[in-house]
Image (spheres, rainbow, N blue to C red):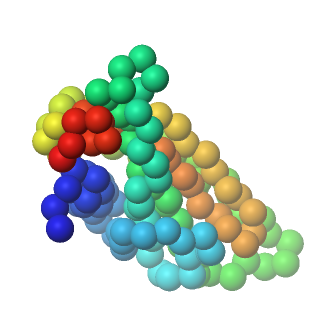
Amino acid sequence: MSNIITTWREAVVAHLQTLFPDADVISGQRTNVNRRDNPLIRVWSHDWTEMARDIQFATPTLTIRYFPTRSKQLAADETRDVGELEQARADLMAGFADKRKVGDLAAGLSCRITGTSTNDADDAWYVDATVTAYTLNLAAVGA
């Protein structure tokens, strides 16, 4: 099945694979810690919202969740450096800075990272980035 949502998500996955060649980039949601030897990135469609000022357009979002590796066990007196999460946030924002024009990632939409956050809890340890697109509203104009 081909639609703008799937095409866009797949294009973001492909772009992330070039930005983070050592990471496993997979579609679908996940919340628990990454115990693999390499980073893990998950991408999923989050929502589709029409623009209040013009229902012909929409601002759909994808969530990118970047999990640094947590395969090494820390000693009891050690703490994890949150700088690793902060660097991932910066890398994600910089990596999408030149992908903002219509068609850069998928035909018919422009997108950019509109927000990032970290979860530095021991049972989580990831960065979330919200990618927001601007496109025609499928609910108003059809596919």
Quick check: 45 left or right of 138?
right
Which image quadrant is residue 56 in? Answer: top left
Q: Residue at x 46, y 48 (%)?
A: 47
Question: Compared with residue 85, is residue 70 higher up or lower down, i.e. above or below?
Answer: below
Residue 139 visible, this orientation: yes
What residue is shown at x 35% (from left), y 34% (from top)?
58
The quadrant the N terminus occupies is bottom left
Left or right: 101 in relation to 27: left
Question: Looking at the image, how many numbered discs can be counted on the residues?
Answer: 0
Measured along the vertical axis of the image, is residue 119 above or below residue 35?
above
User: Residue drawn at (62%, 81%), measured in percent from left and top?
Assistant: 72
Residue in the picture at 29% in, 35% down: 140
Residue that protrudes farthest toward the right in the picture? 77
Q: In the depicted view, which residue is nearer to us: 138 or 126? A: 138
Tell me if 129 is positioned left or right of 54 in this view. right
Can residue 23 be seen? no
Residue 103 x %, y %: 14, 37
In the rendering, at what x and y percent does residue 124 appear? Answer: 67, 68
* 42 is higher (above) or lower (below) than 52: below
Q: Position of residue 73 (x, y in %)?
A: 69, 82
Residue 1 vs 127, above or below: the answer is below
Q: Quadrant of residue 30?
A: bottom right
Q: Quadrant of residue 108?
A: top left
Which residue is most to the top? 53
**Residue 141 in picture, x, y percent from top left:** 22, 36
